Image: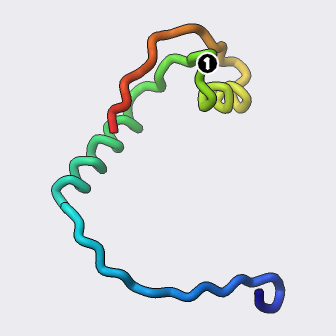
Amino acid sequence: MGEKGAVHFEIQSIKVAVDSDRARETLHRAAALLRGPLPSIDSECEYCSWRTKFNPGEKPSKTERQPNLL
């Protein structure tokens, strides 16, 4: 650790083989998901409980689970 609490890391470039078509499709699907409506709140979902903590007007209810689109 350096002065004023700065942490220094070694940076190294590593070449990784990727499928750019798959990455592009995943990005498009994620963007479409984010533009869509919020799913219903499920009382058993840990993420929904976080969501209702910051949006107290939303009420949890027992709903069907949303499919994992990604």
Residue furthest toward the bottom? Answer: 3
**Label 1 SS:** loop
Q: Foreground: 69 or 14?
A: 14
| Residue type, label 1 | Glu
* 16 relative to 26, above or below: below
Residue 41, percent from left and from top: 56, 18
Residue 57, percent from left and from top: 70, 18
Q: Foreground: 8 or 40?
A: 8
Residue position marked by numbered label 1 in the rendering:
44
Residue furthest toward the right? Answer: 4
Q: Is residue 9 left or right of residue 37?
A: right
Quadrant in the picture for residue 58: top right
* 46 relative to 9, above or below: above
Quadrant in the picture for residue 30: top left
Q: Is residue 56 left or right of residue 42?
A: right
* 16 relative to 53, above or below: below
Give me the residue at 59% from left, 24% from top: 45
**The N terminus, quarter of image:** bottom right
Q: Is residue 51 left or right of residue 3?
A: left
Q: Foreground: 16 or 43?
A: 16
* 45 relative to 31, above or below: above
Give me the residue at 28% from left, 41% from top: 29
**The C terminus, quarter of image:** top left
Quadrant in the picture for residue 33: top left
Residue 68, percent from left and from top: 37, 30
Residue 7, percent from left and from top: 71, 83
